[in-house]
Image (cartoon, rainbow, N blue to C red):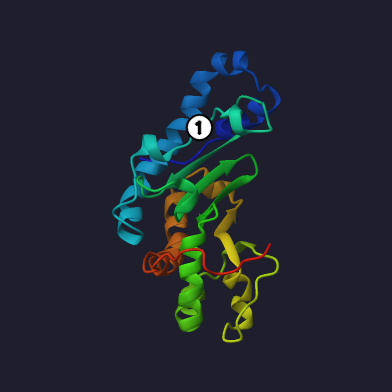
Amino acid sequence: MFKGFTDETFEFFMAIRFNNNRDFFHANHDWYVRAVRQPCLELAEDLGGFIHEYFSPEMDTRPNRVVSHINRDLRFSNDKSPYRDYMWLTFRKPSVIRSLELEVYFAIETDGASWGMGIYGENKSLMNGFRRKLRKEPSSFLRCLDNTDGLSQWINAYKRMQVPEEIPAELENWYKARSFYLDTRFTDFQVIKSAALTGEMEASLQKLTPLYRYFQTIIPEDDTINAKE
């Protein structure tokens, strides 16, 4: 059962930031497991039932699959330091490429925590289907956004895509979206270091359920829309 992160969690993140080498990590591996990985696994375990009920029973909720590793894959990173100074949890359908599917996530770092939902890669066929649905019935998507008060919207949009006249002004950037995510940035360390964090997350993530289910109804389309960057 998740009891909260501790001062040791954030002290470890700070320590690995300034001692980012294998000797330090291996010498302090027990610290990492106790203060970082174990509470992340416990949080993932506690959130599993909520994720299946409010998002999808198809999402993988196995803690060892949900919780990230702290070591970097240096093959694809400009940052060649071997370890991250943060951790995250990712809930998604296991059979879909991560960058092409909506996922629910949680992240923890020295500055606090964040959580939300998004699609991080450029899934053209899904977003083309979204644009078609948005043209036909923008009101249904607006109703999904009505529930997202308090969440920040981050949209990676095409710069010069034409937006049809029937799209409301407040949805123009959404219409041009290549990818997006909505999140909550949380800095109440008293809650982060307690079991109450789980309830705080669930109350916030519930606001994203209609948006998630909306995207599950979209029929992907071939890249027929001329999207100029």
Q: In which quarter of the image is residue 165?
A: bottom right
In the image, residue 65 lies at what x, y percent?
A: 38, 37
Residue visible at 66% across and 31% down in the picture: 14
Residue ID at (47%, 79%): 143
In the rendered image, the vertical position of residue 130 relative to residue 57, given as above or below: below
Q: Position of residue 189 (x, y in %)?
A: 58, 46
Residue kind at label 1, given as amino acid type: Val
Which quadrant would residue 175 be assigned to in this image? bottom right
Eyeballing the image, is 132 above or below 91? below
Q: How many labels does the image show?
A: 1
| Quadrant where the C terminus is found in the figure | bottom right
The quadrant of the rendering that contains the N terminus is top left
At x 68%, y 31%, the residue is 79
Towards the viewer: 207 or 145: 145
Secondary structure type for disc 1: helix
Whether residue 1 is visible to the viewer of this picture, yes or no, is: yes
Q: Report the residue marked by disc 1.
A: 36
Q: Nearer the viewer, residue 131 or 4?
A: 131
Q: Position of residue 78 (x, y in %)?
A: 68, 33
Q: Nearer the viewer, residue 57 or 46?
A: 57
In this rendering, position of residue 64 left or right of residue 168: left
Q: Residues within 10 Å of mark 1 (few under 14, many from 20)?
A: many
| Residue 137 seen in this snapshot | no
